[in-house]
């Protein structure tokens, strides 16, 4: 195994990882050696798929907007499970980050007087989402990447897949990776580590996310003994394209798109009359599935998927070309018609992980409520600072990624500038063990096809852990996932080579996904209420008396072990959530 020594190792090259790397480089005046590690080419990270925009109160007073109103919308949108100290930090720092990206060269859409334009997003009281057409994530990531390339002290390791997180007691020591181009195993020893690997929505089959969104960083921490928080809260985006699940941005509704049932009616009037299509995503998703279950949906002839329609025809071609060009191109290329002429078939798809690695307000990884992992942070979607609570408001995710990327990059730099790099000798045994686990998986002579396990995982999650959940269905899923975990021990990796062994990488991903799915289901079974994206048929109301608390899941050889922690309330007392 090759040993590489850095001051800071950043795992993940999306918005959070790149923002952390850039901040650490700036803070140290280019003195710290930083490794930016990505399992694909860095510019293919899933942040490029973020379409609609980034939230922030750029012009206080306009339309009555304020930082406090943004905070209230976020707390309410998250069904009061969000930690409000984190929410306050998000809304106060978001405007500065949007302007920072303006200085980096992001081509924001602007009004005729030169101001950054703001569009409406679900659950927001007023328009406060800055955007660059419907390619916001791509433009933001491209700006970061261009700037990172100017720092000679940042080394980018493309196509390096992380397999292990090495801790020594409560101290971060290293990430172990496979160089996919050669098969060589590499250990990145560092004074500080940042996990920024994104979410885990690929545990579902019908999802807006890339095949790369397998929750690797969450799984690495979980398998290293770190608890994961609130994993039962998976966000379902209301408008996944039929039949692929590809994202149709909420901006389509923010610009005025309608949701129609088979009767040609804008049915959101029955579910959120004041907000209509711009209600929070959990409410819109439940409305769509209710319409479908009550016989007012459509059926796709090819896939058999039931759906409703998203109609943007009335916006006109010029507005669509200006504000939603990628959506138009996507529909034309995949479905063969233009959304200027015909409505788009959509249904809810797994989209965002509101839970993640247990971290504190500063993004530092926590083993419990009081014990931190020295030198380790988790940023972006993989780290649950709990700003989103039980339901994320659209466009708050990009704010979270770049704000906590900045916070954690600077914190890691401060630590690294004052610490000496520890030697490898005291973790040699751990590194050998990690490499041995990879070799054992590769040599395994079992009979289970990992891709069959993945198909059964997807079918289970799509069927029993979807928008509406039942006690019986979750118990079926729980039993099935434990069966899959047992069968995984007998998998067979057919490609025995070292060079670009995607078969081996995907086998490891599948094992990670099965264990992450267990945390989702275990948390859901034990949360006997409906809150945000977690909707239980038998428990249709929110229960603050018993469940205004965060779920913590710890790994065991069997089912995850659960405990709970307190939700931080500062300004906004929980109240009934109406729209």
Image: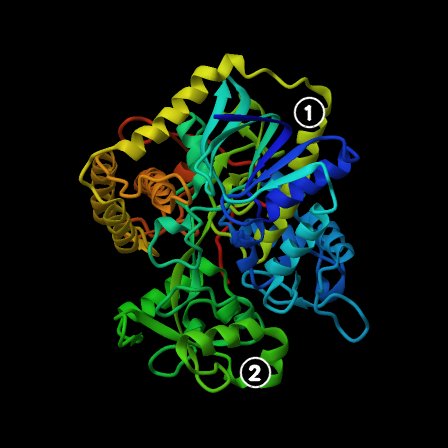
Residue in the foreground of this view, choosing between 53 and 92: 53
Q: Do the numbered discs 1 and 2 sit on residues whose CB atoms are within 8 Å? A: no
Within the image, what quadrant is residue 9 found in?
A: top right
Residue receiving disc 1? 415
Residue 88 visible in this rendered orientation of the protein: no
**Toward the viewer: 531 or 396?**
396
- Viewer-nearest residue: 306 or 326: 326
Is residue 544 shown above or below 347?
above
In the image, residue 379 above or below residue 539:
above
Residue at figure coordinates x 21%, y 37% from the top left: 487
Q: Find residue 368 and name its label.
A: none
Name the residue at the left extreme: 447
Q: Residues within 10 Å of mark 1 (few under 14, many from 20)?
A: some
Looking at the image, is 246 positioned above or below residue 315? Answer: above
**In the image, farthest residue toward the top:** 426
- Residue located farthest toward the right when viewing the structure as drawn: 113
| Image quarter of residue 239 | bottom left
Q: CA distance from mark 1 to mark 2?
A: 52 Å
In the image, taking residue 486 as reference, residue 193 lies left or right, namely: right
Image location (x, y in percent) of residue 343:
43, 81
Position of residue 503 measured from the top left corner of the image (x, y, whole percent): 34, 45
Badge 2: few (under 14), some or many (20 or more) residues near its Cα, within 10 Å? Answer: some
Instruction: Kindly identify which numbered label has been placed on residue 315.
Output: 2
* Element assignment for label 2: helix
The residue sitting at 60% across, 59% down in the picture is: 138
Q: Residue at x 47, y 87 (%)?
A: 341
**Residue 88 location in percent, x, y?**
65, 44
Q: Which residue occupies 25% across, 46% down?
A: 453
Counting residues from the start of the chain, the first of labels 1 and 2 encountered is 2
């Amino acid at each position: 195994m090759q040993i590489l020594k850095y001051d800071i190792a950043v795992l993940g090259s999306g918005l959070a990882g790149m923002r952390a790397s850039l901040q650490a480089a700036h803070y140290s005046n280019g003195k710290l050696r930083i490794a930016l590690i990505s399992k694909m080419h860095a510019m293919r990270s899933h942040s490029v798929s973020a379409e609609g925009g980034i939230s922030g109160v750029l012009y206080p007073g306009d339309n009555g907007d304020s930082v406090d109103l943004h905070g209230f919308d976020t707390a309410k949108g998250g069904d009061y499970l969000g930690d409000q100290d984190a929410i306050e930090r998000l809304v106060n720092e978001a405007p500065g980050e949007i302007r920072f990206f303006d200085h980096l060269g992001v081509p924001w859409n602007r009004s005729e007087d030169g101001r950054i334009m703001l569009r409406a997003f679900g659950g927001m009281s007023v328009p406060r989402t800055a955007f660059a057409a419907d390619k916001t994530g791509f433009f933001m990531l491209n700006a970061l990447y261009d700037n990172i390339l100017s720092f000679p002290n940042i080394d980018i390791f493309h196509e390096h897949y992380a397999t292990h997180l090495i801790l020594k007691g409560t101290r971060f020591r290293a990430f172990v990776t496979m160089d996919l181009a050669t098969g060589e195993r590499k250990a990145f020893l560092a004074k500080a580590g940042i996990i920024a690997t994104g979410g885990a929505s690929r545990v579902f089959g019908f999802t807006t996310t890339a095949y790369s969104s397998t929750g690797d960083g969450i799984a690495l921490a979980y398998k290293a003994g770190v608890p994961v928080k609130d994993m039962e809260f998976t966000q379902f985006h209301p408008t996944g394209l039929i039949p692929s699940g590809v994202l149709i941005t909420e901006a389509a509704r923010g610009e005025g798109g309608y949701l129609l049932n088979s009767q040609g009616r804008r049915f959101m009037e029955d579910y959120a009359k004041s907000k209509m299509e711009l209600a929070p995503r959990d409410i819109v998703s439940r409305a769509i599935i209710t319409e479908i279950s009550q016989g007012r949906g459509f059926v796709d002839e090819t896939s058999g998927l039931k759906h409703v329609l998203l109609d943007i025809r009335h916006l006109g071609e010029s507005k669509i070309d200006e504000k939603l060009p990628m959506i138009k191109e996507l529909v034309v290329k995949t479905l063969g018609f233009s959304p200027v002429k015909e409505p788009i078939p959509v249904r809810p798809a797994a989209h965002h992980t509101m839970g993640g690695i247990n971290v504190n307000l500063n993004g530092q990884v926590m083993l419990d409520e009081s014990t931190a992992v020295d030198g380790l942070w988790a940023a972006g979607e993989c780290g649950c600072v709990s700003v989103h609570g039980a339901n994320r408001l659209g466009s708050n995710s990009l704010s979270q990624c770049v704000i906590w990327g900045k916070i954690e990059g600077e914190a890691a730099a401060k630590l690294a500038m004052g610490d000496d790099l520890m030697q490898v000798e005291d973790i040699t045994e751990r590194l050998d063990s990690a490499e041995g686990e990879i070799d054992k998986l590769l040599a395994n002579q079992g009979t289970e096809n990992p891709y069959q396990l993945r198909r059964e995982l997807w079918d289970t999650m799509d069927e029993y852990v979807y928008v509406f959940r039942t006690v019986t269905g979750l118990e079926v899923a729980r039993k099935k996932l434990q069966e899959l975990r047992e069968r995984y021990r007998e998998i067979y990796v057919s490609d025995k080579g070292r060079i670009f062994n995607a078969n081996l990488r995907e086998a490891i991903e599948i094992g990670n996904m099965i264990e992450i799915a267990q945390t989702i289901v275990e948390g859901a079974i034990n949360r006997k209420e409906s809150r945000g994206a977690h909707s239980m048929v038998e428990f249709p109301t929110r229960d603050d008396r018993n469940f205004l608390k965060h779920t913590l899941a710890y790994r065991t050889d069997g089912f995850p072990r659960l405990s709970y922690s307190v939700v931080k309330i500062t300004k906004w007392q929980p109240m009934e959530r109406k729209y």
